[in-house]
Amino acid sequence: MATLNLVQAINLALIQEMERDDRVLILGEDVGVNGGVFRVTEGLQKRFGEKRVVDTPLAESGIIGTSIGLAMAGLRPIPEIQFEGFLGPAYDQICSHAARMRTRTRGAFTVPLTIRVPVGGGIHAPELHSDSPEAIYAHQPGIKVVMPSSPYDAKGLLISAIRDPDPVIFFEPKRVYRAFREEVPEDEYTVPIGKARVVCEGGDLTVISWGASVIQCMQAVEKSSRSIELIDLRTIYPLDLDTIEASVKKTGRCVVVHEAPLTAGMGAEIAAQVMERCFLHLEAPVQRVTGFDTIMPYYKLELDYMPDATRISQAIEDAAAY
Amino acid sequence: MPRKIVHSVEIERISILDEHGNFDAALGEGLIPDADLVKLYEAMASCRYLDEVAFKLQRSGRMGTYPQNMGQEAGSLGAAYILDKEDWLVTCYRENCGLFWRGVPMESILLHWMGDERGNAMPRAHFATPIAVPIGTQMLHAAGLAWAAKYRGESRIACTFFGDGATSEGDFHEAANFAANLDLPVVFCCQNNFWAISTPWRIECSAPTVAQRGVAYGMPCMQVDGNDIFACAYAVKWAAQRARAESKPAFIEMVTYRLGDHTTADDARRYRDQAEVDVWKERDPLIRTRTHMERRKLWDSSKEEAMQARIKVDVDAAVKRAEEIAAPPAADLFDSMYAELPAQLAHQRDTRQTHSLASDQPARTEGH
């Protein structure tokens, strides 16, 4: 079994799905000759040719709009949007068409595409290269939103996304890209969309997070003397509410951690669901540790913006002491 | 030489059957056989009558907002007539005539504007995409559909329709750029009808023609009289041949006019002069086609009368069929959202409630 980082795990998933299914093709800015700005598609054009790994003009709406046409015709396009900050120009095609085509045509046309997008801060990038827009897309009915935090999950979830008959936005946390390696089976496997992962079990308090913040949560959990259950959502929509409910009913306390801003973030939805499902089990109000309701700062202040182990630990203590 | 011309452009305009019924045999003879021309005329007349009926349906509360096609029948029909049956037809919402020629049932279009998604459930065999409401977004889908055909080694091409206003949208430019640079077999057909609701063409484009917008992307361009079924067919034939043979796009500007309001929710008298409308009424695609057929002894008033009676029966029957389709069950709201319904959504479907204290029984619904 190979020990891979997140970039290598995604690269491997792409290779295996392209070998398995000739309907799968990759398109985007710099994905071909250059192998992607993060090298996620490294070597793929050489391996599969210019027909299946396509360098497109620099136009995000064009990348998604043509991908929708490719998918309507029955292919399985995997467009890459280079950074989450550039999803904006493609928002119209994603939400006005990809998300609506199945219901608009009552199933006559479907859009099985996987939009790969590097996401989040922590890599000293310029403006609009560090945002966390997952809640925006989770709010849009008709699409699925996925964000792995580990190489193993990334490979398995990406394969699930590619095979999914509906549009999936696959967010790749940049801060995790080369942060660590883990064993990733060479063999084919899938991680189901819509299933959270219990990272570690505990009885005192539940911490829920996803993406790069999971790493910060693990640090906080390790520092804590309490018995903490950490849940990595892995899928933002549809939420795995059963796993959340079972955990919070057991612990009675819940802290949600995400990089995106507080207001109308996914933490708000999770807090509401926990309140509805676990009302009589709650020993403390659900706490949210998130980015501030500010614009994501330039990189000198990015660590002041993003939740870190110190802020998470504080919230754990406050919820535990309530 | 410090100065030289590096590029210059001429835009050709094609007119075969002019507004007075004069026919350019050199360009037009043999393009549309007489027997087909009669069918095309009947298709346009049928579409025109549907517009009248649809307007009345909306005014009497039997249908929602409806965009009349009146005056613009020739463009999409000429294209649908020339294209192969399995070429993609990627339209917006003023191309009923082409869609009907392709085989899309009239009641589907009616059903769509009656607020029922099932009207958009286009059978794959028609190779027609659903009605696209957001302006100027569907040309990218045409580029993708053409790309898929090329990817699979099929001879299929895509032909997309949009208005002059849509050429102001960024997606038009991205579609043109993708199609040209990635060598995609797309025929871009802009129906320049001079009005985007109340916005005159001059606010959309400062160049003398819309056609030349294609030049910037390295595409061959042509302007045609968009009310001339022969010229529209001629241009699409030219563009489709090139697309099929060379896998390259072309751009056609069809100069036409929206004789009606933008939709039934609009009143064009607020922003345009009747004198302008009157000029264009004389250029109606139906009038000149009928004149031409009469000159060729293909048509007379008794045939016209018989046809109008036939159309009335057909259109009225389509309206009846559309109106007889009962509202779908409310579960339809949910069932087409995903291939497999997520648990939360299944719960919303089953209970018709979103509040968490709801029992698992469906909510009692008051009659609508």
Image (cartoon, rainbow, N blue to C red):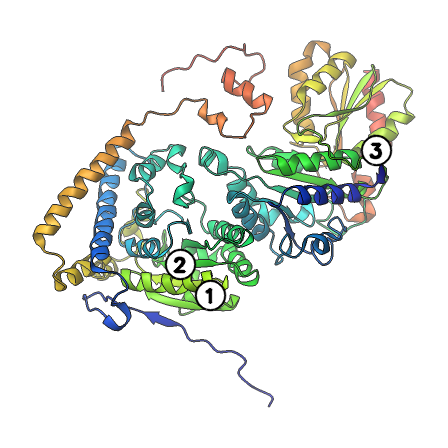
Question: Which residue in the protein does label 2 denote?
Answer: B190
Question: Which residue in the protein does label 3 denote?
Answer: A216
Marks 2 and 3 on same chain? no
Sequence order check, earlier mark of 1 and 2 = 2
Question: Which residue in the protein does label 1 denote?
Answer: B213
Name the residue: 68% across, 12% down: A279
- Residue B20 found in image quarter: bottom left
- Residue B330 found in image quarter: top left
Residues A95 and A20: in front is A20
Name the residue: 80% across, 48% down: A299
Q: Chain of mark 3?
A: A
Name the residue: 23% across, 67% down: B18
Asked if labels 2 and 1 touch by Cβ distance under 8 angstroms, the answer is yes
**Kind of element beneath mark 1:** helix
- Residue B250 found in image quarter: bottom left
Q: How many marks?
A: 3
Asked if labels 3 and 1 touch by Cβ distance under 8 angstroms, the answer is no
Residues B236 and B203: in front is B236
Residues B65 and A188: in front is A188
